[in-house]
């Protein structure tokens, strides 16, 4: 008799209720081992690969690709074998269980506990009769499944590219966006999809709301109808900041980093918060208290193929300019790859969103739930500007100009505090030397 074990979908974040199945790495009949990746799921916060807490043979998968599964529901059933028999076959009397390192499950609450190292070893899964299992009888599906991240798979689907026909050039044999685009460009008229005539085109298309987009929609609605929003705007000459950026780019310690204007906007926001601590707080409805945060976890809104995500940089107020530049680069790269961890998506205290990257001048940003303020940065443009000298002579010059929009929770901040924060940020960007005061 076999000993079936059901692996229930765990909460891979903080209080998440469901996840969507992106891709299975196993199928029924496969022999698997402890900590082997079995499935990739997408939660409201990130795409996550789940390892198996058991070794044995897969007997059932309880969800299809694209299906949403509630936390706590059965995900997979694994036959772990009768007592005294390992997943490799009958025990020979020398061992009746896996070594402790391989028993350690990566997910709390599943499988035997031990001081696992997380290191895998290659197993030769033999049937009970002791004969070697032919390579062809193993999971052809797993062996043939191309290695590609979820955004790359989505791009391939949109372009009609079969990933099994793409030659990977990425690290570890992974398929990159460039690989997919090249494959799409090489498609001949005979093999390329033929667009349907307009008369056959459907009048509308329905897209299921799942994952990040579903979470973002719910969070924005809750924020808009919970926190009384106020938005203020200011147009500022940032020529001095752009000159500072040129100086920083030329410094040796910054040569391996991408120094963008966003870095200086982030720095200005963090510095200005010190004079307006109410903007770095939250509202505790149950306790009827305002909670002032004595640390800054700076959220940065990032547009990805999976939707808008807002990971945050922990302790941004304690970072040097170089450390902040590195943190921004890491945050952006991880978000675009769809690998932002649930921990990086929680605990934010204030948010920065760069709408200028899309060529937009300004906007009215909605607060990230639980935060008091969000700053939107518009495009930095060369514009005619009235410049006044110390002797009050005025002239018109081309200057670097941008628009800032600050939305804040009127329960936590009044108009004076919101105006002081926005004016303080603008003052630093207009004359960065003021940050020394």
Image (cartoon, rainbow, N blue to C red):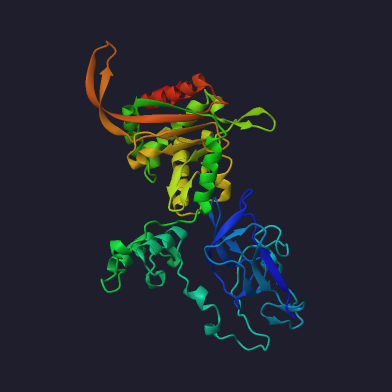
- The residue depicted at 59 percent of the width and 74 percent of the height is 122
From the viewer's perspective, tell me whether residue 169 is left or right of residue 373.
left
* Quadrant in the picture for residue 94: bottom right
Q: Is residue 316 above or below residue 385?
A: below
- The residue depicted at 30 percent of the width and 62 percent of the height is 199
| Residue 407 visible in image | yes
- The residue depicted at 25 percent of the width and 71 percent of the height is 189
- Choose between 194 and 52: the one closer to the eye: 194
| Residue 314 visible in image | no
Q: Is residue 222 above or below residue 140?
A: above
Find the residue positioned furthest to the top. 391
From the viewer's perspective, tell me whether residue 169 is left or right of residue 7.
left
The x and y percentages for residue 35 are: 62, 66
The x and y percentages for residue 48 are: 55, 58
* Quadrant in the picture for residue 410: top right
Q: How many labels sit on residues?
A: 0
The x and y percentages for residue 294 are: 60, 30
The x and y percentages for residue 374 are: 48, 33
Q: Is residue 280 above or below residue 326?
A: above
- Choose between 338 and 212: the one closer to the eye: 212
- Choose between 364 and 36: the one closer to the eye: 364
Q: Looking at the rendering, in which quadrant would you find the N terminus?
A: bottom right
From the viewer's perspective, tell me whether residue 372 is left or right of residue 176.
right
């Amino acid at each position: 008799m076999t000993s079936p074990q059901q692996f229930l979908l765990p909460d891979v974040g903080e209080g998440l209720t469901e996840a969507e199945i992106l891709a299975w790495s196993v199928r029924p009949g496969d022999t698997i081992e402890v900590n082997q990746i079995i499935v990739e799921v997408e939660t409201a916060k990130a795409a996550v690969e789940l390892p198996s807490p058991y070794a044995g043979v897969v007997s059932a998968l309880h969800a299809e690709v694209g299906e949403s599964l509630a936390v706590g529901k059965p995900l997979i059933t694994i036959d772990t074998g009768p007592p005294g028999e390992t997943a490799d076959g009958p025990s020979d009397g020398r061992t009746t269980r896996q070594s402790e390192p391989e028993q350690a499950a990566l997910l709390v609450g599943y499988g035997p506990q031990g001081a696992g190292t997380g290191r895998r070893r290659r197993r030769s899964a033999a049937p009970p009769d002791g004969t070697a299992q032919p390579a062809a009888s193993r999971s052809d599906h797993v062996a043939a499944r191309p290695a590609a991240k979820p955004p790359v798979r989505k791009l391939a689907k949109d372009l009609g590219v079969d990933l099994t026909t793409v030659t990977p050039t990425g690290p570890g044999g992974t398929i990159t966006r460039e690989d997919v685009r090249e494959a799409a460009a090489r498609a001949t008229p005979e093999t390329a999809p033929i667009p349907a005539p307009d008369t056959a085109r459907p009048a509308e298309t329905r897209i299921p709301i799942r994952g990040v987009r579903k979470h973002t929609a719910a969070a924005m609605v809750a924020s808009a109808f919970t926190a009384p929003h106020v938005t203020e705007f200011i147009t500022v000459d940032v020529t001095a900041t752009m000159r500072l950026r040129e100086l920083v780019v030329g410094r040796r310690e910054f040569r391996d980093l991408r120094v963008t204007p966003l870095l200086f906007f982030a720095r200005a926001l963090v510095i200005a918060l010190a004079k307006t601590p109410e903007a770095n707080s939250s509202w505790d409805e149950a306790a009827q208290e305002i909670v002032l945060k004595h640390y800054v976890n700076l959220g940065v809104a990032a547009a990805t193929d999976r939707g808008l995500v807002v990971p945050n940089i922990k302790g941004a107020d304690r970072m040097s300019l170089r450390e902040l530049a590195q943190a921004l680069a890491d945050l952006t790269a991880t978000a675009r790859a769809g690998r932002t961890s649930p921990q990086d998506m929680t605990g934010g205290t204030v948010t920065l969103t760069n709408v200028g990257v899309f060529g937009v001048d300004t906007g009215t940003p909605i607060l990230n739930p639980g935060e008091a303020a969000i700053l939107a940065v518009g495009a930095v443009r060369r514009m005619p500007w009235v410049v006044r000298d110390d002797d009050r002579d005025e002239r018109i010059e081309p200057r670097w100009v941008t628009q800032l929009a600050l939305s804040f929770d009127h329960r936590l901040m009044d108009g004076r505090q919101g105006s002081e924060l926005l004016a303080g940020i603008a003052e630093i960007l207009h004359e960065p030397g003021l940050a020394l005061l």
